[in-house]
Image (tube, rainbow, N blue to C red):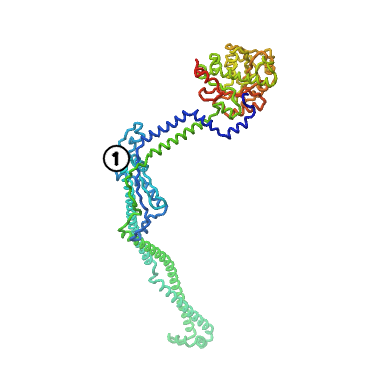
Amino acid sequence: MIGGTETDTPSSFQAALAGIDLREIVATLWRERWILISIVGAVMTLAIIVLIQLTPLYTASAVVMVDARRNQIIDIQNVVSDVTADALAVESEIQVLRAPELAERVVQKLDLTKVPEFQPDSGRGWSRLFGGESATPAGMDDPEYRGAVIDLFEDRLSVTTVGRSRAISISFTSDHPGLAAHVANTLAEAYLEQQLEQKYLATRQATDWLNERTADLRRAAEEADLKVEAYRMEHGTVRGRNAERLSDEVQEVSRLVARAKADAETARARLAVAEQVAERGTAAVFGAIGTEFLVRARTSGGAITADSILAALRNESTIADASVAGLETELDLLQADQDRLSRAMVGQRSLEREAAATRGVFETFIDRFKQTQQVTYERPDAWIVSRALVPIERSFPNSMVLLSVAFVGSIIIALGVVFGRERLRAGFVSAAEIERMLGVRPIAVVPRIRAVAFKDRPQDYVVEKPFSAYAEACRALHTSLLLREDRRTAGQGEGGGDAARALVLLVTSSQPGEGKSVLATSLCRVIAKAGRRVLLIDADLRRPSVHTLLNLSLDPGLNAILAGAPLSELRHATDGATGMHVVTAGQAKGDPQEMLRRPVLAEFIASVRDKYDLIVIDSPPVNVVADAQILGTDVDYCLFLAAWSKTPRAGAVAGYRRLAEGGVPMGGIVLSMAEPDAGIGTYGGAGSYYGDSAYIQN
């Protein structure tokens, strides 16, 4: 390998990631300079166009103060509460100032619908840039048009607090400075007028409601009083007696009942005594009942006998019992009337309480109603601190700021695009980059063919254009390998004893599509065209392509002898354009890795090595299958291809390390399909020598 080592890739890769190469950054910027210039130019041009098309705007501000002071003539807060000046209240007032209703009031008051900047789709700004035309105003009667006008108004309105105070700044932006100040002042005045209207409306609504409610309560109070009186009329007395008199009568009758019962017991006792002594005669009866009853018996007339005395006693007892019964009946009636009256008083007291409550609510509403009737003075809860003045300087756009931001932004965008492309770019774009990341200088850089006719068949291009940069890169690659082989044999003291011994070369890559088969075929054709004896072996048994590139038959091929056929049966094909010999892959016969592990291929190479100057083996990608590692043990050198701007860096590192650590003799790295004008470095081939015409020959 030229000026490099074989197995130092891990440490070199880590060192490359750890450091920042300013020269590489400058090289990247130079390589992408047209992208940088294009982006900056496009952004600045767009910024200038935008700056030209933007309409100058002017902003005017008025300041209102949410007043915490109160001028109270009466206790109107009991009816309509004032605005408090705390933070939440100030924020609420800001929302009121931003409300569409207030905006619509200002729009109608100032007739802003006739102002072009408040007409939707008025053909200003960008619409004018792209040929837009003004639309005929539809009028505020159209809901959609009204909503669009209010939206335009609100877009130009800004309402914020001034610091942490109760002051609110009302700012309005317009194309005309005078209109901006007029709208800001009108909005502040409309806000104060709206507050007064709301207070008046609230007071009026409260008055109407109180009036209606008072009438309802008056009727309710009257109805409650009537219910009490009706209840009293119905239950207030029982048989002409009220509750107190009825209680006195019950007590009096109770005493009479007790006295009547005592008299009845006395009469029954006297009768019983008289009946016991009646057999002894009249004198005995007289002695038993006493002279008091005898005096009463005499007054009744007639003869006084024992029988007459007993009859009188019995009559007296009967009368006493009848008196007791009558009094008890009267007492029961009185007690029943008393119970009914007590129950009636419960309902009466409930009705009286309801009537009293209704009268209390009625009286309260009468007081509130009188207060609302006495309101003769009220002021808004805010006042204008400073009115908006006509602005002199425009608030938008600021040309210097816009252009500065555009320039800085374009630089950032351009750098982001450039380094983003570098970051997202999968593969290598310079020989120096390969050396930095892999620690190995590439042995050759093979350019991409620009000629359209040969874009998809470079293997034919080297035949028809033998002195093109592509063909010269293949020759330089072969020369580098021969020089390396000469140094190696000289170091081993072999001299020129094996001059007729063919150089066996393995060509592989990290992944498919990197041009290994094309390069192997092109290299063999260039060398064969120079008169050398060349053998190309297609050992990619899974996806053979050499026979397609050279228009050869797939069979017979390498698979046959690997499957067990005698070496004598292996036949090579001949390339008609150069005379080189080709061993195609043939039809698949089994597991490629198991077949390649057999010593058949090594024996075949040994048997024909003296017949050729160069033997090239095309193998599968190393990161896909392990065939290249198996084949690498029987070759002199292995060429590892990395496609320009395509092969992933990590894949290239992994593939190269896998081969080197597997004991495969590495001949070097080839950067294939490189862009001729990409500035790939001092290792890039013959483009600068042969000139651009060498790339585009037809």
Name the secondary structure under disc 1.
Answer: helix
Quadrant of res 232 = bottom left
Quarter in which the N terminus is drawn: top right
**665 and 294: which one is in front?**
665
**239 and 683: which one is in front?**
683
Q: Position of residue 188 (x, y in %)?
A: 33, 49
Characterize the local packing of mark 1: few (<14), some (14-19) or many (20 or more) Cα atoms within 10 angstroms. Answer: few
Q: Position of residue 404 (x, y in %)?
A: 42, 37
Q: Position of residue 61 (x, y in %)?
A: 35, 47
Residue at which label 1 appears = 114
Residue 655 shows in the view: yes
Q: Residue at x 39, y 70 (%)?
A: 239
Task: Name the residue type under label 1.
Answer: Lys
**656 and 510: which one is in front?**
656
Residue 595 shows in the view: no
Vertical arrangement, residue 53 with respect to residue 234, above or below? above
Q: Position of residue 186 (x, y in %)?
A: 31, 47
Residue 538 is left or right of residue 106, and the answer is right
| Numbered-mark total | 1
**515 and 299: which one is in front?**
515
Quadrant of res 527 = top right
